[in-house]
Amino acid sequence: MNRWQRTPLGTRLALALGVLSLVVFGIVGTVLVTSTRDFLERQLNQQITKTQYDQAMYLNKQISAYQSKWKAPQDWKQITYDPATGTVSPIPGNPLPSEDGVEDLTRLAKDMAGKPEEYRTISIHGEGTFQARACQIEIGNQQVVLISAAPLGDLNSTMRWLLIVSISAFGAALVVLVVAGRLVLRRGLRPLSDMAHTAHDIASHDLTDSSNLPVRADGKGGGPEVEELRTALNVMLDHIDSSLAARTAAEQRLRRFIADASHELRTPLTSIRGYADLFRYAAANEPAEREAHLAKIREETERMSVLVDDLLLLARLDSETPLRLEEIDLVDVASAAAQAFVAAHPQYPLDFEAPSRVIVHGDPMRLRQVLDNLLTNIARHTPRGTSVQLEVTGGAVMIVTDTGPGIPPEHQARIFDRFYRIDDSRSRNIGGTGLGLSIVHSIITAHGGTVNLSSQPGRTTFIISLNPESERAQPVHRDRTGAEHRDVTVPGPQPEL
């Protein structure tokens, strides 16, 4: 990076403005001086022409000296030249110029070559520069050339004065413009400096362990562009803040999940190792004792296999949507789940209500798993004789209700969390892994539906809402104009690990 690139933006803009102004001032000054000189030279030429016209009339005795309106000043050089004889004569009232002057004026008369008039700027040695005009006149019956030369000293002095004044004025204006422009630019760029300080403040924060990003770009002014930039920066900071919060929450869930998974897997592994030691020590004992130890090992192995399968299913649901979607009859799925529950748990009376058909777009195996998990939880966590009701409505809503003791309010908010148990020791004894309701929530979310809980002593209800096939096309949204739009895809679940 060179020195110019390291210069502050305000200074560079001010200098660029100064260079541009210098170019403009140069063009304006050049045009002004040139046009003024041309104007003064035209005025002088007109004065010479009118003076020669009066002098020609005076020489022809058509007017007297007192009647002449245009008299030549004393510093003018004037002669008459006779081309036929080469005689040079002075004009009455104007003495002959010096020998060099006469020679220059005579040369101008000789160069006319039949022209009616000739203008030329000549320099007379020792007397300066003159604007000369030569024209043919007739005195009596004789053709002569009248030559008049006006000094350019006053004109040149005027132009020098104009040039000095213009340079001084433009120079002062340029300095004022650069200084004032720098101050205005510094004030205008102050909001950008504030945002730069905000960025440096963000860089000074340690975001590795904290999800809180309290720094925002404050202030007002700077115009709509700066305000738009400030708003965009704050929106970006809000997005970063929410992303950091989501990352922190995800990391916490991951740590908790790893700890819970390790704890859940450690229990069956410890049991298997203990029963394996007992089997080794009791290998010489009765066959019945060995079979008992092997049965315990198989039981703990099956429990660990179920836990690993549940964890694998949750991981797949988090990473993608591993559903085999097809058009199914939700009534058939619910009826099969109800029949299996009644066959496995005849001590729990079940009431099933459903219309003839409810067509949905879903994975029949996963929806069956949802109902199996909910009904199995009832059999595990409620006393025998608890009444169960399974209802399917025409709006693709499944309602599972039981008359058990209910779920305490302090546990309802976390009932769908992974490895969450209301009574940890009792759940382990009855074979629960704490993942059943998490799987229910993940599967329904993958289908684009919702699952809600309503519980109080004597009545617990899970309400599962799906989109029926007649409404499954896409969810309807309205924009600001009131027009309806439908989504093309059904959103999948957000990962919790």
Image: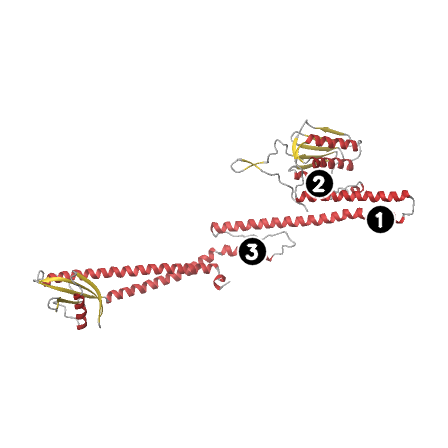
Q: Where is residue 359 in the image (x, y as percent from the top left)?
A: 65, 30
Answer left or right for 43 relative to 442: left
Q: Estimate how packed mark 3 is, as few (under 14), some (14 to 19) or many (20 or more) residues with alpha carbons within 10 Å.
A: some
Mark identifier at residue 199:
3
Q: Estimate how packed mark 2 is, as few (under 14), some (14 to 19) or many (20 or more) residues with alpha carbons within 10 Å.
A: many
Q: How is the structure coloured here?
A: secondary structure
Mark identifier at residue 274:
1
Give the amino acid at mark 1. Answer: Gly
Task: State if disc 3 and disc 2 touch (CB < 8 Å).
Answer: no
Q: Is residue 294 above or below residue 397?
A: below
| Structural distance between the alpha carbons of marks 1 and 3 | 59 Å
Nearer the viewer's eye, disc 1 or disc 3?
A: 1
Q: Name the residue beneath numbered marker 2.
A: 439
Is disc 3 placed on a helix, strand or loop?
helix
Q: Position of residue 452 (x, y in %)?
A: 68, 37
Answer left or right for 109 relative to 317: left
Q: Is residue 212 above or below residue 87?
A: above
| Structural distance between the alpha carbons of marks 2 and 3 | 43 Å
Give the amino acid at mark 2. Answer: Ile
Is disc 2 placed on a helix, strand or loop?
helix
At a point 12% along the width and 64% down the height, the residue shown is 144
Q: Is residue 216 above or below residue 305?
A: below
**Looking at the image, is mark 1 or mark 3 earlier in the sequence?**
3
Q: Position of residue 381 (x, y in %)?
A: 77, 37
Total marks placed: 3
**Looking at the image, is mark 2 or mark 1 earlier in the sequence?**
1
- Of 35 and 294, nearer the camera is 294
Which quadrant holds residue 466? top right
- Of 425 and 85, nearer the camera is 85
